[in-house]
Image (cartoon, coloured by chain):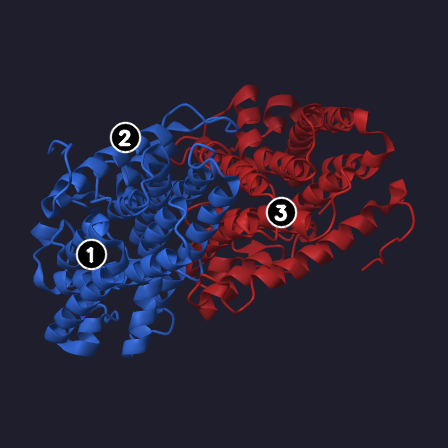
Chain colours: A blue, B red
Amino acid sequence: MSSVPSGPASQDDLPARLAQTADAVEAMLEQVLAHEPDAGEIARPARLLAAMRHGALGGGKRLRPFLTVETARLFSVEGRGPLRAGVAVELVHCYSLIHDDLPAMDDDDMRRGRPTVHKAFDEATAILAGDSLLTLAFAVMADPATHASGDVRAALVLGLARASGVGGMAGGQMLDLAAEGRFDGAPRRLDEAAIRQLQAMKTGAILAASVEIGALIGAADADALSALRRYGRALGAAFQVADDILDVEASPEQLGKATAKDQDKGKGTLISALGLDGARRERDRLRDEAIAALAGFGERARILRAAAAFAAARRS
Amino acid sequence: MSSVPSGPASQDDLPARLAQTADAVEAMLEQVLAHEPDAGEIARPARLLAAMRHGALGGGKRLRPFLTVETARLFSVEGRGPLRAGVAVELVHCYSLIHDDLPAMDDDDMRRGRPTVHKAFDEATAILAGDSLLTLAFAVMADPATHASGDVRAALVLGLARASGVGGMAGGQMLDLAAEGRFDGAPRRLDEAAIRQLQAMKTGAILAASVEIGALIGAADADALSALRRYGRALGAAFQVADDILDVEASPEQLGKATAKDQDKGKGTLISALGLDGARRERDRLRDEAIAALAGFGERARILRAAAAFAAARRS
């Protein structure tokens, strides 16, 4: 793991910052997924906790908490508060992966090169582990350790819930299953507007919320909040197009999961609407839009600019 | 439906109060499960929303929101705030029924005389509907419309999350599946202490939270909060013993679901530890303990006393 630079950051320290935040996220996840029950809990059954830990620990770029932490840092707010808020977002992301992998959903056996939770344990345990990670996310967010102001903590809970539920991530997964033809037997060719809405819900909403939550913790004013929302939405969209392109280009060994599966199933991606070259141009346009939204923040936002480029170029 | 009494309440108006609150809960559920997306949501996919509505609307005694509303009323707090908080608890209860009914869990086809969500829709939709109701619960609780103070709203979210997750309801369902022998093939005969812990987690925690949330909304002082916690825990335990007794005694027609299934599967209930007569005595003892905890509240608490008797005597 890279050492943490102590002097002023350069463009080059995105990898170091990512690694530093990923380590801090892992440590905080260990803390909130400890074996001892929290105040107000009765006990934490060992098998359920093990499944939650399997689904949450030891994996991923931790891009969502990184966005939360770096956005709060724009406003000179650092430390445990933004880290806990980012971990709450990551818990929601991890729950969604566990449930999306279930046999009744995308039926995936592998995730990040390891067996998915229902393969390592069983379906009932995987359902309950996802439920419990989602529930824990809101406990972590609402806890006084996350922010001194109850108004802010309640706003963070509300923002995370709106981005994750029927009108955001879960609704997007539903639209994705419908596009596969799961409910009427025939895969559906979505038009470009429908694909954009599906992706804004399924992956965009929680990435945008990661940024917005950092901005709320940083007490951003209305203009800054609006600019950061534009940044988050464009970054989220760029991330998803990059993911679709990667899925067509990459080998299973590079990804640690099955590839070209989305396309096989007829799922809507922008590649089907714009072609591969068109999708690459759209990815770059969205990346540039995200970067342009940060113009008002000057040099302080260099890490967030690099994060937009990273999200659009991701290779793992 | 009974008309709402306008004069001073008597012991007899528990049924009217229950019916009145159930109507108000239904109306508020209609509001939070509307087709139009909330601010911060992108869209509400029709099939997912229909499944959420199937799982949440038109059924049940609404005992949990009733406890929240009546506990807040002890402190002269009435109206939309406690109702919304009670509806948030009810949304968590409804999500848990949908997920518990899934084929991978208890595999039930009927609930309240209607097909369960995965039968009326499909498994993937039922998983997402449960996820989305759970997520919506926290949005409803955290919304400024629920309470003017952000500190109180954050405390309500935290209390609900702790009672519902790995250390409460979801953990209790896990212990219940384990007691059936789902993970090692052999049903396990739990001792009395283990049965009490399982039930305190699976059903007791959220009933106790329903009361505690009302107390927090009512700004109860430390003594009152402590007494109401004792009330909620004893009521929750009495409710569960009464449910186990009912399951042995009642016909499927009375219940609208399969009966004696829990016992067949070797699940731990206090009947196995204490016998049927012993369980009846324990139910009555717990009911009396709940009522005794309210001694300091005098006449104001008569409805909560009646609710404890109702929970212990329930026939539907």
| As drawn, A64 above or below A38 | below
Q: Which residue is drawn at 72% across and 38% down?
A: B311
Residue B136 appears anywhere in the view: yes
Instruction: Compare residues A149 and B127 and report the one nearer the observer.
Output: A149
**Disc 2 sits on a residue from what chain?**
A
Q: Which amino acid does label 1 sit on?
A: Ala
Q: What residue type is labelled 3?
A: His
Q: In this view, does B151 lie to the left or right of A241?
A: right
Query: Which residue is label 3 attached to?
Result: B147
Q: Which of marks 2 and 3 is in front?
A: 3
Q: Which of marks 2 and 1 is in front?
A: 1
Query: Which residue is label 2 attached to?
Result: A27
Other residues around mark 3 within 10 Å, as few (<14) / some (14–19) / many (≥20): many
The N terminus of chain A, quarter of image: top left
| As drawn, B161 above or below A304 | above
Q: In which quarter of the image is residue A193?
A: bottom left
Q: In which quarter of the image is residue B234?
A: top right
Q: Residue at x 37, y 31 (%)?
A: A32
Query: Which residue is label 1 attached to?
Result: A308
Let me know if marks 3 and 1 both belong to one chain: no
**Label 3 element class:** loop
